[in-house]
Image (tube, rainbow, N blue to C red):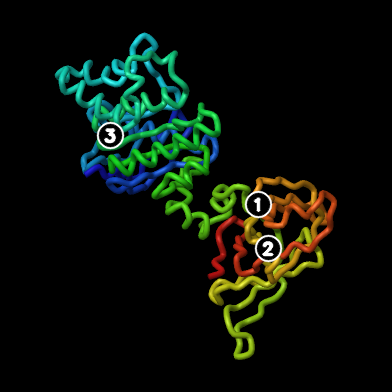
Amino acid sequence: MADVQLRGVRKSFGNTEILRGIDLDIQHGEFVVFVGPSGCGKSTLLRAISGLEEITSGDLLIGGQRMNHVDPSRRGIAMVFQSYALYPHMTVRENMGFALKHAGVAKDVVAQKVASAATILGLDPLMERKPKDLSGGQRQRVAIGRAIVRDPQVFLFDEPLSNLDAELRVHMRIEIARLHRELGSTIIYVTHDQVEAMTLADKIVVLRAGQVEQVGAPLELYDNPANQFVAGFIGSPSMNFLDGTVVAHQPSTSLHQGPNLCQVRLHAFADSVVSLPLDGQHLPAIGTQVTVGLRPEHFHEGGDATLPVTVDMLEHLGGETFVYARSSSNAMLVMESKNGRTLRAGDVLNARFEANKALLFDKNGQRIYCR
């Protein structure tokens, strides 16, 4: 079984600590994606798992065995890099089989493993070509094939699609998802592209400044972020954040059935007070500074709360439109609209949204749970 466990993993370069006590469990067969801003430590963490970086402290276990000081070649892993790292003078067949040949594996076994990987990846017609005769997507498939023939316990992908154009990235995402289904192997994948993360992952690990902010299924992170950082990082366009002050509470009564309501005056909309449903145990005190989070799709004509805005720009994407608007104090909002074709820059409108979909965060960015 190819479970991967990290216990208090730290990595420092001199006096600079890059990984700050990572605790993580990756189950056999899971597709786990590391995401986070540049410099958060996601590639360093992947390299620590691979053995390309030595762990400063903590424990790494693969298949239940401690791997801290085990040579990378003996960890049962195979890594696919952002750069294809193919030998330019070798054919596709030779590139895919090189590691096995170098390890002294019998020729017939090498040939069988290379042929099997080529079939899985659709490389059969390209086996005698050299890298210069391949497209970017074909080169990446060869790099993946080189990893497959090693029959690893764990595949490690370090931003493998970054060098491809947008259309080819979509195609390769489909290929990698299909590969995971067919092989059933454990995959750990690093990317800065959250679309890749949302579409490929069974589980996403969000990192910031060398620490894990939240771990969960893609839609769980999207719907229930633990803090403002995760809420803003997951989702494109990003969540709207509006600063406000709690001005009143409306407790649940026999006349007002349902959750307690927390009334927040939004600073950028001086006359706008929104009522947000909250658990009575989490009602912030009157006068508390908070941040209200609204996703673009929470705005629609059936919403029960309104914000006056002026349209700045429209981003037409065919079936949907993203409306970029601003308040009278120039606070920006992004809204998704199904009727965006009727809008024009400069239009003044009351943007309606669902108050019960809003998220609330305290001054430290921690979630105040509404439901």
In the picture as drawn, the residue positioned furthest to the front comes out as 125
Residue position for label 2: 300
Up-down: is 229 above or below 251? above
Up-down: is 368 above or below 141? below
Residue position for label 1: 320
Which amino acid is tagged 3? Asn
- Alpha carbon separation for disc pair 1 and 2: 12 Å
Up-down: is 11 above or below 310? above
Left or right of 256? Residue 42 is left
Which amino acid is tagged 2? His
Instruction: Find residue 252 and name its label.
Output: none
Left or right of 252? Residue 213 is left
Residue at 61% x, 87% y is 253
Tell which circle, 3 or 2, labels the residue nearer the N-terminal end.
3
Residue position for label 3: 68
Residue at 76% x, 60% y is 267
- Alpha carbon separation for disc pair 1 and 3: 49 Å
Residue 355 spot, x, y in % from top left: 65, 68
**Residue 287 seen from this side:** no
Q: Secondary structure at mark 2?
A: loop
Which amino acid is tagged 1? Glu
Tell which circle, 1 or 2, labels the residue nearer the N-terminal end.
2
Residue 17 spot, x, y in % from top left: 46, 35
The quadrant where residue 304 appears: bottom right
Residue 88 spot, x, y in % from top left: 39, 11
Category of crowding for the residue at label 3, using alpha-carbon neighbours closer than 10 angstroms: few (below 14), some (14–19), many (at least 20): many
